[in-house]
Amino acid sequence: MRVAVSGVGAVGAYFGWRLIQSGEEVVFIARGETLQALQSTGLRVDTPDGASVVEQVQAYGDPAQAGHVDAVILGVKTWQVRDAAEAMKPLIGPETFVVPLQNGVEAPDQLASVLGQDHVFGGLCYMVCKKVGPGHIRHEGMEPRILFGELDNRPSDRGQKLLDAFLRSGLKAEMPADIHAAMWEKFLFIAGLSGVAAVSRALVGVLRSIPETLGLLEEVLKEIVGVARARGINLREDALAATLRVIDGLPEAATTSMQRDIMDNRPSELAAHNGAVVRMAKELGLFAPLNGAIYAALLPQELRARGEVSF
């Protein structure tokens, strides 16, 4: 397969690297210092087993230079999805599909509004990975997994080809029977944990060791489960307990990307996490007070990071 990675942060770089390992042709769409680093020194991935350097990679600043590809792995932040969809049009051929790996559940609809639903999959991943510098990422914990599939959940040859490519690299990969339920299970995990972690400014190990903070997390998760079920999402019966088990298995020093962005005064995915829970609950005539409190408490810092308020 010929696969493009649009958004070469920690997630995009990692999964692009795994596809290179499986022998696929990968082109990276990047900009600025990341583009320069990829073109000059290649891609470096630090893992618990050691460092891997791909000295020569295909990297372009203009998607038109890359031409049509079989698939696109989208690794941009949630607020960049619409712009990324417009920019990637030169990559899209008749059978090209895009796999969004954003921490949220709204990216497929945003992509479909620009590219058409036939070109969009649902997708998600689990991993703890950080960008160390331009063209350099570090996998810090949690065994990486990627899940994706057609939005109507039908089996497809094009999806199977990408799945086989990831499996050849030794990565845990799956096309679940219900991609929407899988995305919401990830959303339950990341939105709940990110919100509480960002408010508390605590490492995961600390957060889960304090009964009051852990109790807050459990109640935040219950609100998200309620919104999902009201939207007709077929969450597993033990979704909340399963999410807490995943959190229990994270490294003690783990943090979330939203938490790190807020603490470093960078724009975050707050609107696509707890903000989305509040918005979707309101559309359903429901109330999500704890997610609402988290969103309201963090919003001034978010607006400051985006240059909309000053204090």
Image: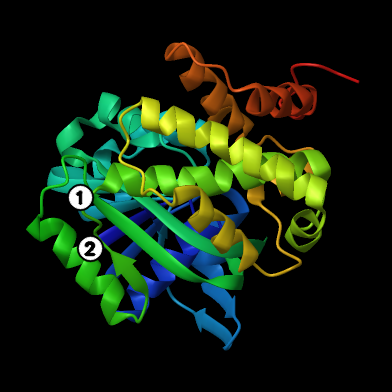
Where residue 283 sits: x, y (%)?
A: 44, 13
Q: Which one is nearer the viewer's eye here, 218 or 199?
A: 218
Q: Which mark is residue 111?
A: none
Among numbered discs 1 and 2, the one appearing first in the sequence: 2
Question: Is residue 9 at all visible to an observer of this figure?
Answer: yes
Where's the N terminus, which quadrant?
Answer: bottom left
Where residue 203 sits: x, y (%)?
A: 78, 58
Q: Residue at x 47, y 30 (%)?
A: 226
In the picture as drawn, the residue positioned furthest to the right comes out as 311
Query: Residue under circle 1?
Result: 68
Q: Which one is nearer the viewer's eye here, 153 or 217?
A: 217
Is residue 9 positioned above or below 1 on the image? above
Q: Is residue 1 left or right of residue 289?
A: left
Q: Residues within 10 Å of mark 2 (few under 14, many from 20)?
A: some
Q: Residue at x 56, y 75 (%)?
A: 44
Query: Residue under circle 2?
Result: 2
Determine contact: label 1, label 2, CB under 8 Å.
yes
Q: How many marks?
A: 2
Q: Amino acid at mark 1?
A: His
Q: Quadrant of residue 173?
A: bottom left
